[in-house]
Amino acid sequence: SEASRTLPSLESIQKVFEQQLHPGLHQRSQMLGEATPVNIVLKLNQLISLLSSIEEKVKTLLIEGPDSTHRRSLIPPVTFEVKADSLGIFSKIHLKVDVEMGKLIIKRAKDGPEDKFYTHKKILQLIKSQKVPNKLVIVLETEKEKTQRKEYVFSDSKKREGFCQLLQQMKNKHSEQPEPDMITIFIGTWNMGAAPPPKKITSWFLSKGQGKTRDDTADYIPHDIYVIGTQEDPQGEKEWLETLRQSLQEITSISFKVIAIHTLWNIRIVVLAKPEHENRISHICTDNVKTGIANTLGNKGAVGVSFMFNGTSLGFVNSHLTSGSEKKHRRNQNYTNILRFLTLGDKKLSPFNITHRFTHLFWLGDLNYRVEQPPTEAENIIQKIRQQQYPELLAFDQLLLERKDQKVFLQFEEEEITFAPTYRFERGTREKYAYTKQKATGMKYNLPSWCDRVLWKSYPMVHVVCQSYGCTTDIMTSDHSPVFATFEVGVTSQFVSKNDLKYTDSQGEIEFLHCYATLKTKSQTKFYIEFHSSCLETFVKSQEGENEDGNEGELVVKFVDALPKLTPIISDPEYLLDQHILISIKSSDSDESYGEGCIALRIEATESLVPIHAVLTHHGEKTGVFQGEIKLQTSQGKQREKLYDFVKIERDENAGQKPKNVSNLDPNKDWDQTNRKSKPHLMAKEAAAVARYWGSASSSPDAPGKEDMFCSTPTDISNASYMGMVAFPQQPSAMSQLKQIPSPEQPSSLWSYEQQPKENVSGMGQREASATSPSLAPLSPKTSLQPTVNRSICSRSQEHLPLELGRSAAEPLLQEEGQQKPEMFENPLYGSMGSKGKAALKKEPDYAKASRKEQPLPHDQSFHLAKLQELESPKVPGKQPAPPFLVPTQRFRSYTCSGQTEEKNTGEKTQGKLKAAAFMENASPLKKIVKSSRCEVSLSAQGQSSKPPLPSKSRAVLDMQSSKGRDYRDSSELPHSGKHRTEEGPLGRTTTP
């Protein structure tokens, strides 16, 4: 019969699709084809089951492709409800993103017909508003090759972020470029507490929980690389790998490839990547360092993995440092040991440790730094956690304080912490912290702390954005919660010349001019420079420089004609502008490195002199700076726009905010990305003139525990916080001059650690915590008082803005907190700029003595005195003539406020706000009274001059001036209540994204 003839061929097809045949099917198909009704029914049933199973297989194959394990995950279409602004009238519309089809569909109703759609090629750019955290402008190409801007307001900033990520994914998926410009990396760290994990840990990989989390709409977007670090991991490697791969398969439908796995005792690191990236990853290295007892036990230490992703080097370190609240110095030593002895990356870069060997280095783990408070404060801490008052606790976070003092993780960054401490929980719940532990030696206290952290350090001027940073709330088998962080990072391709003949005769050249290094050393040996880079055939060695004595304990090494011209292997600007030059200053006697630094070649104006400024470090400590100018010559052509340039941040003059990818606390980043892009011409001729003018400059010795502008370049030139914080050198260098000229396009931003309420947009323009940029460190108790606000608001950077803007920048900040404006804006001691830079001042000790004799003056008198001093200034011997650019006058932060000041202030509280402000002003002992900035004069002229004059000299002021400042960090008496905390109020609102 027909059925008997068809069955064998169908069975053959079935085998092709690897489908198990029904038991007994073979025997039945071989039966003689008797035309009985029973047989016919049986055969028809077999036919139906075979055909339906084949149909199912064909369908899945068509969707998944030939190899289902390697298929790319399908991202379902996602619809966003937004408001569109049309002639001031807001109407609800729906934006549907279809990543697979490469379309953005605009609809009036969610289930209604399509009104319009734009293909991925027609979507030119996304511009995020700084001022309104949930507003987005989409630049579209219309039919006549004209562009159109459409403005949409999302329900919150997380939705906006999810929408941007989906469109980036769409652009990436349909890109004509064979290699990616940008990848996303998931980083997870979890101290498992020697207990096996629960069955479900997917929330960790979806960045769900507390803190800066991903929007649900981004759940379907898989990351390119997953890096998972565990400590106290009780499982075997195979068992843990299986758990991870199954969890990722469940949420992404992708079978991830294992790139590396490395274990030291119970410390483990696993790197997984999408199958499509397998051939892009090479040069895999793994290593470990033991820092346990006598540095021989592996119960504490670090494991690391490094590899190349196309042309970009990536490094990952998972560490478990010494525990115990009192052992922070031991932890700092652990960090230094890991830096010195962990060997990852390119072995040719022998003078450089891991902090300079990678384009992007990520450091994760149980770092064990604690909240430094006495055990008696335990219940207060828990109360603050319940009220989500994290900034108040972060002011005592050991890691942030040690980083601020430049003792550890120099030049690293960390996203703002907006989640609860991840240690020490009672197992099985996340509602209760178990902070006591009975030991043989007595009761041990483990106060709730942020032990589990993720930090990163990238080369200057490369793209890196932290998209999420938080902890899970549903994984409770350990006394620690897992922490997640996700990053968008720029990567470069393995460059292949488009036209071999055109590029064979290398037209490229890198030239260093007017360079000198300032080293913290008393050695009188001769020094030379080694230049290392992947764009050079081999490292290049310079001639010896000429030594000159700098300030106390410093040596200036000048390289006038000693620096060779460097010839890159490829001169195409698309390749060369993505490269970096590593420098090492070595002694001629021992060939030992005295400092290493990194210089970006991303120079907008090629063939013109551009100033450079690189911080030099050695074994994790700052050892000096390298300064001068660079001239880059490339072949013809220009860089194409990268995928990460698809999303931009609107420069809004009213919003004093930094773009997302600008670095935070650490001002030691080498260049200012945004300023360079918005203002490429840093006036090369003027820069050169300044460099020559200050060619003989040498830096002042660092005040202990201070970030100084000379040795560290802020990423945001106009960030008033940096200006307020730093101690300037006695003779500002060319670069410090340049860095201090704010861009009129970049308004100042203020320091803060306070979270902002959702959807709260003031005239200043504020963003929610979910869309914030990398965090600023919480100010230590010693420095977190109102003068900081005063300095910031009246800083030079505001002078570029109209007066009204200066006022509006200050007022919303204070009014938002529900506080009155402090009576401090008119204090001339905090004017950040005089009309002339006063370069040479007495050393710090003299400063302090002199200031104690000083008495406060009413505003008008002090202003006249400042003018008199300015007129007399030429008579003072040893003063430098005014430099070509305006420079902020020196301020020594160490003396701005003290414990004694606070006590006196509290005592005098009844005497009213004006007196309190006067005491605060005198807490900053500046020897010379500085001329008020325009901002202050205007403010005092507009209605503030009618206030009664400040008291000339009260008893409290005299006591305060003769008293010596105390550092709360070394004292058991911590300012957890009283006036100290309320003084911090105006710092609360930030304008940093």
Image (tube, rainbow, N blue to C red):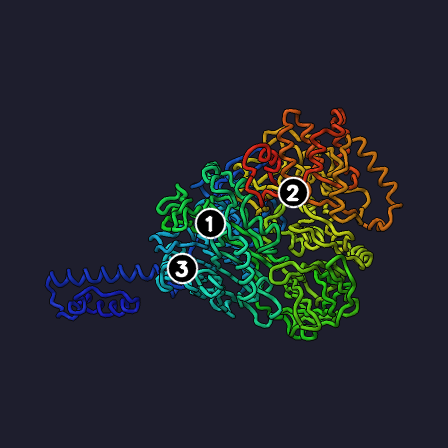
> Which quadrant: the N terminus?
bottom left
Q: Distance between the residues labelled 2 and 1?
A: 30 Å
Q: Which structural element holds mark 3?
A: loop
Q: Which of 404 and 7 is in front in this view?
A: 404
Q: Is residue 490 left or right of residue 81?
A: right
Image quadrant of residue 826?
Answer: top right
Q: Which structural element holds mark 2?
A: loop
The residue where tag 1 is placed is: 218
Badge 2 or badge 3: first in the primary sequence = 3
Q: In this view, does 327 lie to the left or right of 46?
A: right
Residue 295 position, x and y percent, is 49, 64
> Which tag is nearer the camera, tag 2 or tag 1?
2
The residue where tag 3 is placed is: 254
Q: Which structural element holds mark 1?
A: helix
Q: Which of 926 and 118 is in front in this view?
A: 926
Image quadrant of residue 815?
Answer: top right
Q: Distance between the residues labelled 1 and 3?
A: 16 Å
